[in-house]
Image (cartoon, rainbow, N blue to C red):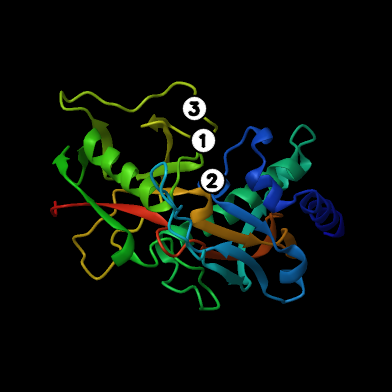
Amino acid sequence: MVNIETRMGEALKQVNLSNTIVDASSGKTIGILDRVTVFNANEDFKNNQPFAVMVEGDTTTSRAPIGTAPTLRDNNIRKVTFNRKRISTAIEITKQMLNNAGFDVETYFKKLAVKRIVQGIEQQMFVTGSATGSEDDKIQSIFATPSLWKYQVATTSAGTGKVTVLKDQMQNALTEYCGNNGKISNDMFWTFNMGILTDVLDKNGNSVQKDDNLPDGAYARLLGKSVYHTNYMATQIDTDTTVKPLGILMSKDSYGVAISDLELTSVSKTRNGTVVLVVEAWVDGKVLNQNDALKILVPSTAF
């Protein structure tokens, strides 16, 4: 028992979770989390202290024609505070795994621990998180203020519960998002609800999504921006049950996740020799740019 606890504990110490999530050189995608801003809050969270960052609340630029004076703006710099919430997973290591000399059980354990913790955070971001994230067991939902961020697009049925959208509708959403935020950067991306939105089409019914030269984890490119899928999109984003989110247009600075390193907290053994290891991390998530953080794509008519 001591041997497996020591082995797996040392394996976890090799994982810097915040770096693992954002490290593109690993060649592994970590879901949507590696597209948003990730903060290493290990020291603060392990000491039960909040982690705070200063963010720019208004990213709108001041523009003016040549020869005219731009309008002065007082950019809204504000403090965002992350408070730790525990997220954990139990991983079973069978006797066969332990006794198989050709099986790298430490690598298996590390990868599975990271995958499950990250999936748990993503599920909170898109489904089970709350409007404020002030609860001890919830982070802030990415749909925190749907009344500000909803963007209606016309849809066409693609079968029961599924739709397509015309390219012009998505172009308008992108243009408005860029205009409101003064953004022309490459860190914007789409996240589609893969259970509902099947494709984006031109007026002739041809798909306009491209599949060449894609970054890791993306399944397509639309209007020059990468498209990602998630299995954790909410079924509704406010009290109206007919408003099903089709997807989100956002950027890296739309949402932030503060996270600690992984820790092995308990080890137990079952009667059949299987070892159960409990891994935990401390985490919190917040919307960073409150003014126009993202565009939540919703159908203009219920389907």
Mark linked to residue 35: 2
Whether residue 73 is visible to the viewer of this picture, yes or no, is yes
Residue type, label 3: Leu
| Label 3 to label 2: alpha-carbon separation | 14 Å
Residue drawn at x 47%, y 62% as measured from the top left:
73
For this view, does 101 lie left or right of residue 86?
right
Residue type, label 2: Arg
Residue type, label 1: Gly
Measured as percent of width and height from the top left, residue 185 is found at 49, 40
Q: Are marks 2 and 1 in contact (CB under 8 Å)?
A: yes
Location of residue 268 with respect to 161 vertically, above or below: below
Measured as percent of width and height from the top left, residue 69 is found at 44, 52
Q: Are marks 1 and 3 in contact (CB under 8 Å)?
A: no
Mark linked to residue 217: 1
Q: Secondary structure at mark 2?
A: helix
Please tell me which residue lies in front, 57 or 278: 57
Measured as percent of width and height from the top left, residue 104 is found at 75, 37
Question: What residue is disc 3 on?
Answer: 214
Query: Which of the 4 image quadrants contains residue 202?
Result: top left
